Image: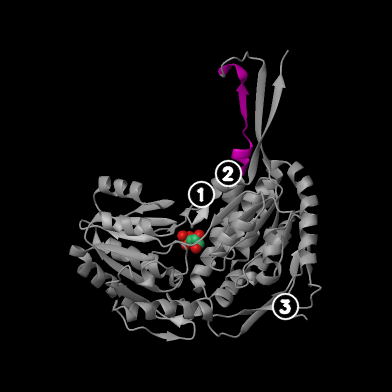
Amino acid sequence: DGDVFKYYCEGEWKKSASGKSVAIINPTTRKTQYKVQACTQEEVNKAMEIAKAAQKSWAKTPLWKRAELLHKAAAILKEHKAPIAECLVKEIAKPAKDAVTEVVRSGDLISYTAEEGVRILGEGKFLVSDSFPGNERTKYCLTSKIPLGVILAIPPFNYPVNLAVSKIGPALITGNSLVLKPPTQGAVAALHMVHCFHLAGFPKGLISCITGKGSEIGDFLTMHPGVNCISFTGGDTGVAISKKAGMVPLQMELGGKDACIVLEDADLDLAAGNIVKGGFSYSGQRCTAVKVVLVMESVADTLVEKVKAKVAKLTVGPPEDNCDITPVVSESSANFIEGLVMDAKQKDATFCQPYKREGNLIWPLLLDNVRPDMRIAWEEPFGPVLPVIRINSVEEGIHHCNASNFGLQGCVFTKDINKAILISDAMETGTVQINSAPARGPDHFPFQGLKDSGIGSQGITNSINMMTKVKTTVINLP
Ligand code: G3P
């Protein structure tokens, strides 16, 4: 069937032996946009087997050559930004401009990774024994960083290209091979991105891209004995994966309930601008979105008015028209969001706008006077709905933030830098932004979540280190 996009294995584009496909539903039209192969467990086995073989010679390929190929892939990716962005628009309803930004940012990320990789991996350590009590200077220890083997990369739907290359780049520069399982929504964008690596001329088998149903190959992939490291970004599935995975390093970035604490002395225009950008960009479908505003009662009315005025200016409609608010990724996601909104309604939250939904398109909604007994106070809508909780002390805000199971990022708005630092220290999150909305980038910054928000740290430098292991050789002198 020529309509079904092929998967990538052994340096070739292939049809699955299953004869089955997985449909990708366009969130805007709610009709099938594309189809991808439903790969089988045998096909996963094959990808793992060749990844293992390809890795051995890749690890011996000089580092500068590995970097050169990555730079080439980055350039090809940027050249093809238009067709890849088009897929993002159709598969995940990302606004057209943001879709292009995602691809360009991905090219930059790959190049930066190549540069960072040659510096980090180009250095080792030399230790001598006589610093430890009882030792003479008779042992010299040489350290270097070696690859782990086969990396399994599983990115989420909201950045199918960028959060794939943030795993692929570090995996390849460090001498690992890679099996990519893209999200269903976003799989075609990912296949196009993989094609750029194919065109760059990476060795056969080094990269595979396996598409299919999570129910069929998800556990099979994550529990596969051929996997030496899993890098996963996504939701609750990550918790399940971490329980089932074998003795391999895990890198996980899961959900968040990023709080925005606004103090009395804050620049309220700055805060309002960041709340709207942070809460509603890509319709709130970012793990680093502002997901709860905790504002001091004395400035709450003013802040809410300012946010409301900005929300009124957001455009709502199809991603092709570059609207700010576009349909959420699926009907089940829209239904989940609606459930949170109805729960808040029943419990008397103040609706700053009327609730409106057409298909998967949900109009931006600010909910004021949210209380801790409402689900929206704790759960992650992953949609354009933002709760405001009024607080009477900073401690109350910190308490709410830390009572969450999540701990990805948070932010605080105040002109008092001393207070800001103290609040940052008290917030149990991987990152705290002072006077700006949460965000992962710039992409070389460390990116990590505490508690259910993740395991390990990402960002270019940390991912490079995470995908290597230290190897030592000790020279024993007579
Ligand atoms: O939701 C994925 C997470 O990595 C967010 O990235 O760039 O939107 O802060 P960003």
Alpha-carbon distance for marks 2 and 3? 39 Å
Color theme of the render? one colour
Cβ atoms under marks 1 and 2 closer than 8 Å: yes
Q: Amino acid at mark 1?
A: His
Instruction: Identify the mark nearer the N-term, 1 or 3.
Output: 3
Decide which of 379, 439 is in the foreground and name it.
379
Alpha-carbon distance for marks 1 and 2? 9 Å
Residue 165 visible somewhere in the drawing:
no
Q: Amino acid at mark 2?
A: Glu
The residue labelled by disc 2 is 116
How packed mark 3 is, by other alpha carbons closer than 10 Å (few <14, some 14-19, many 20 or more), is many
Residue 368: image x %, image y %? 28, 73
Residue 440 visible somewhere in the drawing:
yes
Residue 229: image x %, image y %? 66, 51
The residue labelled by disc 3 is 21
Image-based side of 150 in relation to 408, left or right:
right
The residue labelled by disc 1 is 444
Alpha-carbon distance for marks 1 and 3? 37 Å
Image-based side of 399 in relation to 173, left or right:
left
Q: Which residue is pictured at 79% across the width and 65% down the height?
A: 43
The quadrant holding residue 399 is bottom left
Image-based side of 279 in relation to 156, left or right:
left
**What secondary structure is found at the residue carrying circle 3?**
strand
Q: Nearer the viewer, mark 2 or mark 3?
A: 3
> Which residues fall within the magenta stretch?
116-131
